[in-house]
Image (cartoon, rainbow, N blue to C red):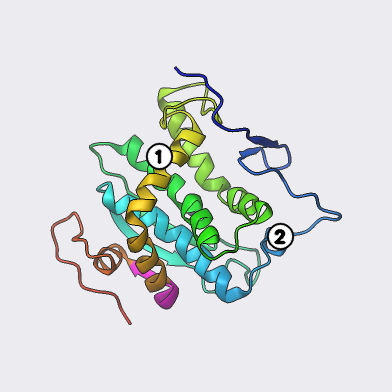
Amino acid sequence: MNETVRSAWYWNRDFGLYTRQPAPRLDRPTTACRVLDLPDALLREAVATHEAGHAVLALHLGARLTCVSVADDLGRGPGAPGPVGRVDYEPNPAEPVRGILLASAAGERAQDRWLRQADLWTEDRAWVVEILAAQDRAVIERTVRLAHPDGPTYGVGDDPAVDLAALHDYVDVWLRDLWDQVMVLAAALNRCGTLTGAQAAAAIGLTVNDGTSASGVAA
Ligand SMILES: [Zn+2]
């Protein structure tokens, strides 16, 4: 394997996670939301873009998408904090590993792209986007380990099936080509909160892969 260093990554001991961006220097403990520092309307747009990134890649890779949603409370509760959004899908059985790797990485990369597009990108916000994608990263790590027991590398290889920087670069190209669809689906999600797989597919002009014609997005 090519061992050229593509990019420097940073180890975050508190989170058990490598990130592309260094952790912000904080004077006192705070929350991810405070570092993100976005008003609720923009935060919801950011979450919708993350989930739309997952969903658009999953659909294009032949997954059976059941549901995609943004939590109305943006994960705050009442009670214990919950997920800010979710995507339920079964990867295409013909290439499940590729499907899971690309769709899992697409959430955070879509969110990073959206921050840049909205002129909101800062190193600190991009770092939060990575930290909030910890569950997606865990799925990627488990999936990489199926074929590569040592687990993923970070910025030292060219194989998207092993190296997370290479996977991000690969997914970024997909997102560039499908960006209009990600934006359309994010807007529909922002409006509706929850979409079925058929509604999500219809929103971006795809027919769902079970052959049924999509029924359109609920108003
Ligand atoms: Zn995600």
Q: Which mark is residue 95?
A: none
Q: Can you name the residue that lies furthest to the bottom here?
A: 219
Quadrant into which the N terminus falls: top left
Image quadrant for the C terminus?
bottom left
Q: Are marks 1 and 2 in contact (CB under 8 Å)?
A: no
Residues in magenta?
190-195
Name the residue tied to disc 2: 35
Element under label 2? Answer: helix
User: Residue shown at 54%/58% (left/top)?
Assistant: 116
Q: Amino acid at mark 2?
A: Val
Instruction: Inspect the magenta stretch and tell me whether residue 114 lies in it.
Output: no
* Callout in the foreground (1, 2): 1
Q: Is residue 209 above or below residue 158?
A: below
Q: Which residue occupies 49% across, 25% down?
A: 157
On the rendered structure, is 166 left or right of 26?
A: left
Residue at 21% in and 61% down: 206
Residue 109 drawn at (x, y percent): 48, 50
* Residue lying at the far top of the rendered structure: 1
Q: Which residue is mark 1?
A: 170
Task: Say whether residue 191 is magenta.
Answer: yes
Farthest residue to the right: give it. Answer: 27
Whether residue 87 is visible to the viewer of this picture, yes or no, is: yes
Nearer to us in this view, 107 or 24: 24
